[in-house]
Image (cartoon, coloured by chain):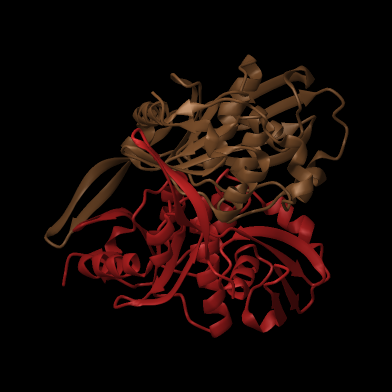
Chain colours: A brown, B red
Amino acid sequence: MEDRVETVSIRRVTEDGASDIEDIVVREFPLTIVLNDQELVTLLCSPSNLKDLAVGFLFSEGFLQSRDEIKTVTVNSGTGVVRVQTEGGDELAREALFSRLITSGCGRGASFYSATDVSGDRVESALTVSVRDVLALAREFQHRSETYRATGGVHSAALCDSISVLVFAEDIGRHNAMDKVFGECLLKGIPTDDRLVITSGRISSEILLKVSKRKVPILVSKSAPTSMGVKLANELGITLVGFVRGKRVNVYTNGWRVTTDN
Amino acid sequence: MEDRVETVSIRRVTEDGASDIEDIVVREFPLTIVLNDQELVTLLCSPSNLKDLAVGFLFSEGFLQSRDEIKTVTVNSGTGVVRVQTEGGDELAREALFSRLITSGCGRGASFYSATDVSGDRVESALTVSVRDVLALAREFQHRSETYRATGGVHSAALCDSISVLVFAEDIGRHNAMDKVFGECLLKGIPTDDRLVITSGRISSEILLKVSKRKVPILVSKSAPTSMGVKLANELGITLVGFVRGKRVNVYTNGWRVTTDN
């Protein structure tokens, strides 16, 4: 696997003068996903966990329902191509993807949301978690985000139970980071229901739709949700926890899952 | 124009207990762009400057070259549809857009970059700017970002000369914020060459391609660039200034445009 950061020569400039120094920047890598011999999409991503990313993306976009449908996944990190062969793959995947694409200027997403579209994805889990556990998980999550600390340029996502981080991924894109987590879960058969997902990024409608597809009942972020994120979380039965800062959290929806017990 | 934020009821939870309070979240709004009676794309955006956003998007994606090509732009903010009629608009815009789309998990972008593709967009401006002016502009830019301070959920972008911010826009998506700025410039005939652009977001290849299309010689961000952002800026002749913090800046490429003179 290729490095996730690159060293560059920069000038550090102040009013008092300039100096030439070395700095590191996060790598941006184009990954083309070929589904059943059809070029589907090129993602700009961090060059790690490319197999997970491709599988997670295909699942999020509805091209995969389970691991059993996957015949082969071949990664060529030199050319930046992942080839995925699935059962029954002669539909018009490319057009199907396009008709589902929404670009938010900061992310692709699912087709225009309506309550009827997503009602089948409602999350019914009875999981509850204490605010103490949420805060502890958020701290562990933060400590794992090494690339971010080095370069200030990546997002992280993780699957957790109430005790610890189980699956962790980083990417320049917040959607990619989450697709990497869910791709790894799918490939390794790791259950995602009755668990939490933490993201470093803003919680928008697109992230909610990914999470609900995996039946995750609790979504946690240091950042803020959008209005549509809150609306969707409410209707999808997902507990949305945002602005995790210091010793407090904001619970936007389905608050019964976050308890003050210890 | 609709409000950019919404009030929601939330629970603030600490280990000591929970309280129900009102909070505000940033709105996320689906805007569908219809180009010459063909539904092109739906952007998830902040509901402000919708006309600018549509025009800026069409320009960034190559469907518009100048204001003269625009016959009409009609915004219906109730239904979330912008209709744009242009001269000579009977090509297959939708397919053309798709073939250019790259989803980065945090943004759409231009087709897979190669040096030959972009050489025509090389920026030749002789503009220079002092580091003092860059720092002052960054401070003014920061002060303008009101919605962000309220909700923690939006990006900002601005066109500046060396003295002040000329055009400013905000959006939940960093690409949308920049498209709004460039759309307003296009509609009002505001020149963008020999000027600076500031963005609150990460500098990726997609942002560089937008900026180079508008011949902007200096791109400034508080955030970090990606490796491909640095490479493109170098080849496109754009001065990339990142990590603007306090009294210093990092200049990644074409550093001759940033002087220590006052």
Q: Quadrant of the N terminus of chain B?
A: bottom right
Instruction: Tell which of A60 and A221 is nearer to you.
Output: A221
Q: Residue furthest left?
A: A16
User: Residue B52: image x %, image y %?
Assistant: 58, 74
- Residue B99 image offset from top left, x and y in percent: 72, 51
Residue nearer the viewer, B172 or A25: B172
Numbered disc total: 0
Q: Is residue A59 above or below residue B259?
A: above
Is B15 above or below relative to B98? above
Position of the C terminus of chain B, as image quadrant, is: bottom left
Q: Is residue A172 left or right of residue B93?
A: left
Nearest to the observer: residue A90 or residue A101 = A101
Residue at the location (78% across, 55% down)?
A: B95
Residue B52 is at least partly visible in this image: yes
Q: Would residue B141 be found to the left or right of residue A35 on screen?
A: left
| Camera-side residue of B114 and B211 | B211
Residue A72 higher or lower than A247, as above or below = above
Residue A148 pos. (x, y %): 37, 37
Residue positioned 61% across, 71% down in the render: B50
Image quadrant assignment for residue A151: top left
Task: Kindly tell me whether residue B124 is visible in this rendering.
Answer: no
Task: Tell me which residue sits at (59%, 58%) in the image.
Answer: B28
Residue A7 occupies which quadrant of the picture?
Answer: top left
